[in-house]
C-alpha cells in the first residue's frame, strides 16, 4: 500500500486531461492531415503506377505492331523485288520478241523488195529484148541483108543480150 | 548521494521557497513537464503540417515517416479497421517517448517517472479499450466475450463462463496496473541511475555517457511496449470478435 501514496487523484485527472488535450490537438493538426496526405500520396502513386503499367502495355503493343509491320515490310519488299524481276523478264521477253518480229518483218520486206526488183528487172529485160527484136526487125526490113550482115546482126543481137545479163 | 537531480522547477521552487505557490510547483512538477511536452509536440505538428505539400520538407518528412510507421504498426496488428486507433496509439507513443527522453535534458524531468502520470495514461487506455469494445460488440456481446469459450454442456454453459467472467474482469483490472507500474518503474530506475552516476562527477562521466545511451534505448523500448500492449488490448476485443464473426459465417454457410 506504500505505492498508493505515490498516486494523487488530482494529478491523475490533470495528466489524463493533458494527454486528452494533446490527443485532441494532434488529431486536428497532425493525424488527420498527415494520414489524409499519406493516403492521397499512396493513391496517387498507385494511380501513377497504373498509368505507367498502361503506358508500358501500350508501348509493348506498339512495338509488337511495329515488329509485325517490319516483318511484313521485309516480305513485301521481297515480293516487290520479285515482281520487278518478273516484270523485267517479261519486258526483256517482249523486247526480244518484238526485235525478232521486227527483224523478220525487215527480212520479209527485203525479200519482197528483192522479188519485186527481180520481177521488175525481168520485165525490163523482156521489154528491152522486145525493143531490140523490134529494132532488129526494123533494120532487117530497112536494109538488104547480106550473109555477113545477118551474121553481124545476129552476133550484135547476142552481144546485146549478153550485155543485158 | 541524491536520488533525483535538480530540475528547473525544483530550483525555482527552492529559490522562492518562502512563496505559497512554491510548494505547488513541486507537487505539480510532473504535470508542468507533461504540458511542456504537449506544447513541444503541438508546435512540431503545426510546423510540420503548416505548409504540407506532396514533395515534403525535412520536418514534414520526419512526421510523415513517423505517422506511416505508426499506421503500419497499428493496422498490422488490428487490420485495416484499426485505422481509427492510429491517432490514439500514435499520440500515446510519441507522448511517452518525449516524456521519457526529456529527462535526459539537464534540469528537466521525465514525467513518466511519476506514478500518477503512468496511471493516468493506463486509465486512458483502459477506458478507451473497453469503450471501443462495448461500442463494437454491444454490452451483452462484451460480457459474452468476457465469459470466454467453449460452452454447451452444463458445466461449460453456466459455471465456467461465470468463472471466466470473473477471471477476465480481474485480468482487465490488472492490465492498467501492470502497464503503469512497468513504465513508471523503468523510467524511475533510469532517472535514478543517471542521478547516481552524475554524483560521481568527472570520474563517472564515461559510465554516465554509456548509461545515457542505455537510457535512450530504454525510453524508446518502454514507449514502444506501452503502445504495443495498448494495441494488443484493442486487438483482444476487436480482432477476436472479427474472427468469431468469420467463423460463425463459415458455420452458417456450411449449415
Image (spheres, coloured by chain):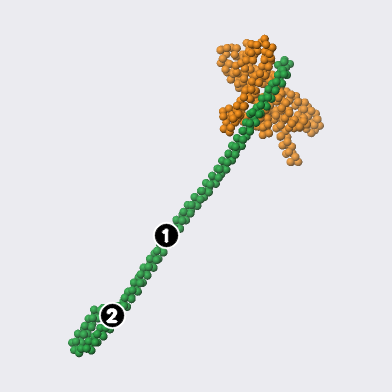
Chain colours: A green, B orange
First in sequence: mark 1 or mark 2? 1
Give the chain of mark 2. Answer: A
Q: Quadrant of residue A123?
A: bottom left
Give the quarter of the figure containing the C terminus of chain B: top right
Q: Which of the numbered marks, if any, corresponds to residue A26?
A: none
Q: Where is residue A45? Give x, y as percent.
A: 59, 37
- B195 or B167, nearer to the observer: B195
Figure check: B216 above or below A163: above
Say which quarter of the image contains residue B191. top right
Residue B79 percent location from the top left of the image: 67, 33
Q: Which disc, if any, is residue A125?
A: 2
Q: Residue at x 19, y 87 (%)?
A: A149
Q: Are marks 1 and 2 in contact (CB under 8 Å)?
A: no
The reply to whether residue B97 is visible in this rendering is no
Q: Residue at x 79, y 28 (%)?
A: B162
Density class for disc 1 (Cα within 10 Å; few <14, some 14-19, many ≥20) is few
Q: Is residue B127 visible?
A: yes
Pointer 1: what residue?
A88
Asked which quadrant contains residue A92, the reply is: bottom left
Up-down: is B95 above or below B195? below
Q: Chain of mark 1?
A: A
Residue A93 in picture, x, y percent from top left = 41, 63
Q: How many residues crowd mark 2 within 10 Å: few (<14), some (14–19), many (20+)?
A: some
Residue at horizontal 52 percent and vertical 50 percent from the top: A68
Q: Position of residue B67 (x, y in %)?
A: 62, 29
**Which type of secondary structure does the marked residue at label 1 adopt?**
helix
Closest to the camera, between mark 1 and mark 2, is: 2
How far apart marks 1 and 2 lie (CA) works out to: 54 Å
Task: Please name whichever residue, A143 or B179, is drawn nearer the observer in this view of the structure.
Answer: A143
- Looking at the image, residue B199 lies above or below residue B251: above
Amino acid at each position: 500500500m506504500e505505492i498508493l501514496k505515490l498516486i494523487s487523484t488530482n494529478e491523475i485527472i490533470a495528466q489524463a486531461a493533458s494527454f486528452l488535450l494533446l490527443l485532441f490537438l494532434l488529431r486536428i493538426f497532425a493525424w488527420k492531415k498527415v494520414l489524409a496526405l499519406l493516403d492521397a500520396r499512396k493513391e496517387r502513386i498507385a494511380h501513377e503506377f497504373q498509368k505507367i503499367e498502361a503506358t508500358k502495355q501500350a508501348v509493348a503493343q506498339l512495338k509488337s505492331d511495329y515488329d509485325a509491320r517490319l516483318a511484313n515490310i521485309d516480305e513485301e519488299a521481297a515480293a516487290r523485288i520479285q515482281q520487278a524481276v518478273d516484270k523485267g523478264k517479261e519486258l526483256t521477253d517482249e523486247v526480244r520478241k518484238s526485235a525478232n518480229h521486227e527483224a523478220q518483218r525487215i527480212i520479209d520486206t527485203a525479200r519482197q523488195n528483192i522479188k519485186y526488183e527481180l520481177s521488175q528487172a525481168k520485165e525490163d529485160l523482156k521489154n528491152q529484148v522486145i525493143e531490140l527484136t523490134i529494132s532488129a526487125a526494123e533494120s532487117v526490113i530497112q536494109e538488104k541483108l547480106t550473109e555477113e550482115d545477118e551474121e553481124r546482126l545476129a552476133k550484135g543481137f547476142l552481144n546485146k543480150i549478153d550485155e543485158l545479163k | 548521494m541524491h536520488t533525483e537531480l535538480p530540475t528547473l522547477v525544483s530550483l525555482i521552487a527552492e529559490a522562492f521557497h518562502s512563496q505559497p505557490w512554491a510548494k505547488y510547483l513541486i507537487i505539480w512538477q510532473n504535470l508542468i513537464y507533461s504540458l511542456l511536452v504537449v506544447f513541444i509536440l503541438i508546435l512540431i505538428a503545426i510546423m510540420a503540417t503548416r505548409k504540407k505539400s506532396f514533395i515534403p520538407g525535412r520536418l514534414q518528412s520526419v512526421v510523415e515517416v513517423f505517422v506511416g510507421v505508426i499506421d503500419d504498426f497499428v493496422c498490422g496488428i488490428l487490420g485495416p479497421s484499426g485505422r481509427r486507433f492510429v491517432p490514439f496509439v500514435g499520440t500515446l507513443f510519441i507522448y511517452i517517448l518525449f516524456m521519457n527522453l526529456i529527462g535526459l535534458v539537464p534540469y528537466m524531468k521525465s514525467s513518466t517517472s511519476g506514478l500518477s502520470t503512468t496511471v493516468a495514461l493506463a486509465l486512458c487506455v483502459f477506458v478507451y479499450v473497453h469503450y471501443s469494445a462495448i461500442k463494437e460488440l454491444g454490452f451483452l456481446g462484451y460480457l459474452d466475450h468476457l465469459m470466454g469459450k467453449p460452452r454447451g454442456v452444463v458445466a461449460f454453459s453456466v459455471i465456467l463462463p461465470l468463472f471466466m467472467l470473473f477471471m477476465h474482469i480481474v485480468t482487465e483490472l490488472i492490465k492498467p496496473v501492470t502497464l503503469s507500474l512497468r513504465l513508471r518503474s523503468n523510467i524511475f530506475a533510469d532517472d535514478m541511475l543517471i542521478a547516481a552516476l552524475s554524483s560521481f562527477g568527472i570520474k563517472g562521466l564515461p559510465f554516465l555517457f554509456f548509461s545515457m545511451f542505455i537510457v535512450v534505448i530504454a525510453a524508446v523500448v518502454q514507449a514502444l511496449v506501452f503502445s504495443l500492449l495498448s494495441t494488443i488490448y484493442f486487438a483482444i476485443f476487436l480482432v477476436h470478435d472479427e474472427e468469431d464473426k468469420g467463423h460463425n459465417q463459415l458455420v452458417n454457410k456450411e449449415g
